[in-house]
Image (cartoon, helix red, strand yellow):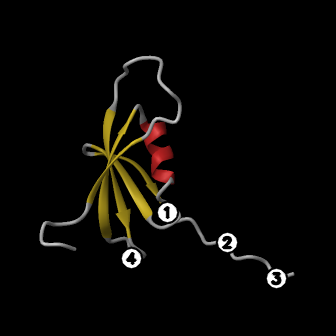
Amino acid sequence: MSEKGPAHFRFSFDPVPSLGEGFVSHYRLYLLDDRDHFVRGVDLSCRDDLDAKLAAELFRPSNAVELWEGRRLVAQLGKRPVEWPKAA
């Protein structure tokens, strides 16, 4: 961690092109390590909870995550289990 504090990222998620200007909500995604300690935060701008959860899924292979909109906890997603190749 640098002297400036934890790393912060901004991420906008729009899987389907919008048909016009729409309302966008601000979400905060917290990446957690294997002991559920904070690693870093990611700012998300998404149309709704579903889009924010889809964006959060992109981080799950490497981290468990918590998704917040302001003071409201939207979702807690555990780290995806690693799938090992099966022996032949």
Distance in Å between CA atoms under marks 3 and 1 = 27 Å
Asked if labels 2 and 3 touch by Cβ distance under 8 angstroms, the answer is no
Q: Earlier in the sequence, mark 1 or mark 4?
A: 4
User: What residue do we see at 45% from left, 51% from top?
Assistant: 56
The amino acid type of the residue labelled 3 equals Ala
The amino acid type of the residue labelled 1 equals Gly
- Disc 3 packing (10 Å; few <14; some 14–19; many ≥20): few
The amino acid type of the residue labelled 4 equals Arg
Q: Quadrant of residue 24?
A: top left
User: What residue do we see at 49% from left, 63% from top?
Assistant: 78
Q: Which residue is mark 1?
A: 78
State which mark lies toward you, 2 or 4: 2
Which residue is most to the top?
20
Q: Which residue is mark 2?
A: 83
Q: Which residue is mark 4?
A: 35
State which mark lies toward you, 3 or 1: 3
- Residue 29 location, x and y as percent? 35, 53
Q: Earlier in the sequence, mark 3 or mark 1?
A: 1
Distance in Å between CA atoms under marks 2 and 4 = 20 Å
> Horizontally, is 41 left or right of 60 in the view?
left
